[in-house]
């Protein structure tokens, strides 16, 4: 079996398992709220707050965040519009719990953004790393539970987010 077929088989199995959970519609209500964390506004508010009110690492955190998102967003857009993977809700016989903001699913932009933020938190505020990564995982999982992403979309988004943040952190001394 080819790697792509194996990945597709896993994605379909995991996706169907998630949507077949008892009380899936109730889980979707919570998932909507968790997913909203990944919309981006909270990251901006927290980043600006740290830049203004946290004198030790706040400004470095904010600059690293700007750099990381400046890397992540264009790569995300190129991947999404080059790969053009249809969302599960567009090809499987069910209706998603939300209307996705765009047509394609790979990679998950919500997951990428959440993992950028979690990686920056882990770098500058390591005591909160576990919490930040837990939230990032929940954001990704919420996108599957809402029916708009496959698990591999989430994994790719996480990899993109962590990589973008790592690159920004690596080059931060050049800027700062």
Image (cartoon, grey):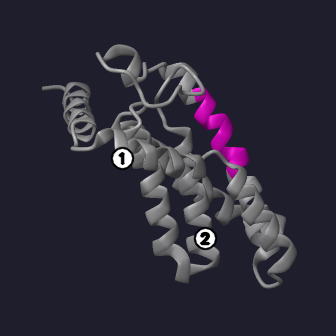
Residue identified by numbered label 2 = 121
Question: Within 10 Å of the Cα at label 1, are there few (<14), some (14-19), or many (20+) other Cα atoms?
Answer: some
Residue 29 position within the rendered picture, expressed as x and y whole percent measured from the top left:
44, 44
Which residue is found at the position 83% from the left and 64% from the top?
Answer: 175
Asked whether the viewer can see residue 157, the reply is yes
Residue at the right extreme? 52
**Helix or strand or loop: what does disc 1 sit on?**
helix
The span shown in magenta is 69-78
Query: What element does badge 2 sit on?
Result: helix
Quadrant assignment for the C terminus: bottom right
Most common SS among magenta residues: helix
In the image, residue 60 sits, relative to residue 110, either above or below, namely: below
User: What percent of the width, then of the height, locates residue 94?
Assistant: 32, 20
Q: Quadrant of residue 125?
A: bottom right
Q: CA–CA distance between discs 1 and 2?
A: 27 Å
Mark 1 or mark 2, whichever is nearer to me = 1
Residue farthest to the left, as pictured: 1
**Residue 159 shows in the view:** no
Q: Which residue was labeled with disc 1? A: 27
x and y, in percent, of residue 41 in the image: 72, 51
Question: At 49% across and 30% down in the image, what residue appears?
Answer: 98
Taking the spot 55% from the left edge, 63% from the top edge, the residue there is 118
Quadrant (top left, top right, bottom left, bottom right) of the N terminus = top left
Query: Mark 1 vs mark 2: which is more N-terminal?
Result: 1
Is 7 situated left or right of 64 in this image? Answer: left
Q: What x and y, as percent, mark residue 139? A: 48, 51
Q: Is residue 142 above or below residue 7?
A: below
Image side of residue 57 versus residue 18, left or right: right
Residue 116 sits in which quadrant? bottom right
Q: Residues within 10 Å of mark 2 (few under 14, many from 20)?
A: many
């Amino acid at each position: 079996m080819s790697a792509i077929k194996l990945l597709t088989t896993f994605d379909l199995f995991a996706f169907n398992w998630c949507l077949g959970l008892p009380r899936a519609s109730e889980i979707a209500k919570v998932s909507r709220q968790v997913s909203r964390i990944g919309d981006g506004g909270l990251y901006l508010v927290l980043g600006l707050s740290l830049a203004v009110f946290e004198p030790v690492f706040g400004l470095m955190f904010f600059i690293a965040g700007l750099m990381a998102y400046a890397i992540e967003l264009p790569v995300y857009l190129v991947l999404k519009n080059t790969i053009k993977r249809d969302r599960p809700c567009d090809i499987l016989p069910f209706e998603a719990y939300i209307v996705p903001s765009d047509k394609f699913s790979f990679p998950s932009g919500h997951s990428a953004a959440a993992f950028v933020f979690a990686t920056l938190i882990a770098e500058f505020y390591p005591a909160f790393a576990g919490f930040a990564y837990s939230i990032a995982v929940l954001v990704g999982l919420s996108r599957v539970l809402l029916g708009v992403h496959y698990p591999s979309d989430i994994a790719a988004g996480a990899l993109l987010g962590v990589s973008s943040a790592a690159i920004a952190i690596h080059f931060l001394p050049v800027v700062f």
